[in-house]
Every structure is written in C-alpha cells, then in structure tokens.
C-alpha cells in the first residue's frame, strides 16, 4: 500500500515542470513542507511492519532525494531565466584585448621575403652557431682575414691546431649558402634571412647582433645582368617604382666581381638632402658573382655553373623605411617604440 503510493509519487515528481518561482514554491509545499506528502509518508513510516521497514525505508529515501534534486533543478532553470545552453550570450561584447604589433624588423623582413619569393626564391635557414669551415673557409676567406679575428667574432670553441674546426657565432648568414651548396647541386635559388653576431661595442649605430638576408642563385649561364635586374626589381618593389639603383665596385672574399648597391634617396628623390648626405644616393646592400673558388669548395663545378649572391642588413633597410635614429631601440623591447608601428603591416 505505502510502496504503491511511493512509486506513484516517484513517477509524478520525475515529470514535474515549473514556469516560475511560484510554481516551485507550490511544489515544495506540496511534497517537502511540514504538511507535504513526502513528510507525511515519513511520519507514517513508524507504522510499517518490521519486515518491510528496510524496503520501504530505501524507497522513501529515494523519493525524498528525487524531490529535492528535481526542485533544485527547476530552481536553477528558472533563476537564469533560460535553459542551460542559452546561458552563453554570444552577442555580448568581449573583454577588450589589446592587440600587439609586429616588430618593425619582422615587418620589413616579411616584405623583403615576399618580394623575393614572388621572383622564385625559396626560403632557407641555417644555424646561428657554426664552424669556421662553413662561415669562412668555404667562402674563400683568407686565413688571416680580419673577420676571423677575436676582435670581430664571438668564439664558442677554439682549435689552435685546425682553425677550420673553431666553433663561432656566425658573423654573416653566408654559412647558410655554403651549407646549401654542399647539400645540393644547381639550380639553386634561395634567400636566407637570420640573425648574425659581431664583436662590436653597442652604440646608436652598431650592435653585437643584427639581422641579414642573403640571396644566392646558381645555374648555368647566370650573368651579372641577371643580378642587376633582380636587384632593380627588388628596390622598386620595396621603395617605389621611381627608385633608381647604381652599382659601385667593391670587394668581398666570396664574390668576384663584387659591388655595393645604392638606391636613389627616397626622401629627396635624388636631389640631395641631409639624409643622403647631399649625394642623392643611399647604400643598401652588397652583391657580386659567386667566386669560382667558393663553388669548387662547396662541390659545384665552376666550369659548368655560375651564380650571383647578395646580402643586406634588415636593420639598415628598416632604418631607411622608418628612419629609426638609434639601432638599440630594436632590441630594447620598449612597447612605446613598438606601438609606433601599429599602422604598418
Ligand atoms: Zn636625399
């Protein structure tokens, strides 16, 4: 008799619904208040026959727990005024998150990479810590070249018996080139951006580390004309279609002939101003035809193949574009400096 009543209530309570707080209060009074049905059953429990007490007691507990749980559930639903999945308001304005900016060197590096990639150059990267063999020897540096001196390069490990085994922080990204030539045969058309290190006193105009980007193209019948045209295209893409270039003879151990390239001053348009020291030209990179000694040292037949290489400083180009007066600003991580590049892309 009592078990039937409990079963009936279990079923009834499982299906309860409520539209508002009044409904819930009404249900609480009906089942769980002092005069409620479940409380009534609890009171009657003392009259249950001893042999049934265990079964009825367990059922009664189950009923009370269900009623308590069910009312709590209905209360939660009503208090948010919504069902569970509607509780997330996707139209709410998010907390404002301050967006950072790209570092100016990254902006300019990406622009340069983009220009050369459109001309068919692949991207390559090499180690910042390398041996003398790949940083200097294979690139035709004479044994007594000043770049190999303690004054100019950071040494990690020295071998007085064989200097080519010295381990150093690379002083240029050209070690990428010797490693690429060693690994594969032409045609090779790559650009290698990366950080380089020099043993320099830090000042507004010099730092112990900076960034370079070098390019290398090796194939059959590559000429100086090819080099000049690629660099002209690059300069016009980066500094504007009116930009002029000029090549001045120079010397680098790994190229022959070698040249330094100037662009027409993009501030005065070549008329002459303080920025270009009234010459109308500003220097932007070094370049030349890869020295046959370098090709041979890296396992490429210089009778069949020829190539050109060029290298530029990313800080230098960034300075030309954005006129950063002090090189140290690039690595001091002052957000006020970085915020000035918010509108750059
Ligand atoms: Zn100028």
Image (cartoon, rainbow, N blue to C red):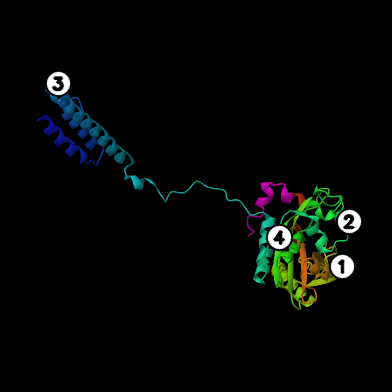
Q: Which quadrant of the figure has residue 177?
A: bottom right
Instruction: Give the labeled residue for mark 1.
Output: 250
Q: Is residue 333 magenta?
A: yes
Please tell me which of labels 2 and 4 falls first in the chain: 2
Q: Determine which residue is flagged by label 2.
A: 146
Residue at image mark 4: 193
Image quadrant holding the N terminus, namely top left
The residue positioned 83% from the left and 52% from the top of the image is: 153
Element type where label 2 sits in the image: helix
Callout 2 crowding tier (Cα within 10 Å): few <14, some 14–19, many ≥20? few
The furthest residue to the right: 144
Q: Nearer the viewer, mark 2 or mark 4?
A: 2
* Label whose residue precedes the other's in the sequence (3 or 2): 3
- In the displayed structure, does residue 73 sit left or right of residue 161? left
The first of marks 3 and 4 along the sequence is 3
Query: What whole-number distance in Å separates the C-alpha atoms at marks 3 and 2?
Result: 105 Å
Measured along the vertical axis of the image, is residue 208 above or below residue 61? below
Question: What is the quadrant of the C terminus in the image?
Answer: bottom right
Is residue 242 visible in the rendered image? The answer is no
Q: What is the magenta range? A: 329-345
Question: Label 2 to label 4, Cα distance in Å?
Answer: 24 Å
């Amino acid at each position: 008799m009592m078990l039937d009543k409990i079963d009936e209530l279990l079923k009834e309570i499982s299906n309860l619904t409520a539209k508002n707080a009044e409904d819930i209060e009404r249900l609480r009074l009906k089942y769980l208040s002092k005069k409620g049905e479940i409380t009534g059953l609890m009171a009657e429990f003392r009259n249950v026959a001893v042999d049934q007490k265990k079964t009825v007691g367990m059922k009664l507990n189950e009923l009370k727990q269900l009623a308590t749980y069910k009312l709590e559930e209905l209360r939660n639903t009503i208090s948010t005024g919504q069902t569970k999945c509607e509780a997330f308001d996707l139209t709410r304005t998010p907390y404002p998150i301050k967006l950072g900016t790209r570092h100016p060197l990254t902006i300019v590096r990406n622009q340069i990479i983009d220009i050369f990639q459109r001309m068919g150059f692949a991207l390559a990267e090499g180690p910042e810590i390398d041996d003398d063999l790949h940083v200097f020897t294979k690139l035709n540096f004479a044994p007594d070249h000043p770049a190999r001196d303690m004054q100019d390069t950071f040494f990690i490990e020295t071998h007085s018996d064989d200097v080519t085994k010295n381990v150093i922080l690379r002083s240029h990204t050209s070690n990428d080139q010797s490693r690429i030539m060693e690994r594969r045969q032409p045609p090779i058309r790559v650009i290698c951006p990366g950080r380089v290190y020099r043993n320099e006193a830090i000042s507004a105009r010099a730092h112990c580390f900076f960034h370079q980007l070098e390019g290398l193209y090796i194939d059959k019948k590559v000429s100086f004309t090819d080099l000049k045209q690629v660099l002209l295209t690059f300069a016009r893409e980066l500094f504007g279609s009116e930009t002029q270039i000029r090549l001045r003879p120079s010397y680098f151990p790994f190229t022959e002939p070698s040249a330094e390239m100037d662009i027409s001053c993009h501030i005065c348009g070549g008329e002459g101003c303080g920025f270009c020291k009234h010459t109308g030209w500003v220097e932007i990179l070094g370049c030349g035809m890869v020295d046959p000694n370098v090709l041979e040292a890296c396992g490429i037949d210089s009778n069949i193949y020829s190539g050109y290489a060029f290298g530029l400083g990313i800080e230098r180009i960034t300075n030309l574009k954005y006129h950063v007066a002090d090189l140290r600003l690039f690595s001091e991580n002052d957000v006020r400096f970085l915020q000035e590049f918010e509108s750059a892309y």
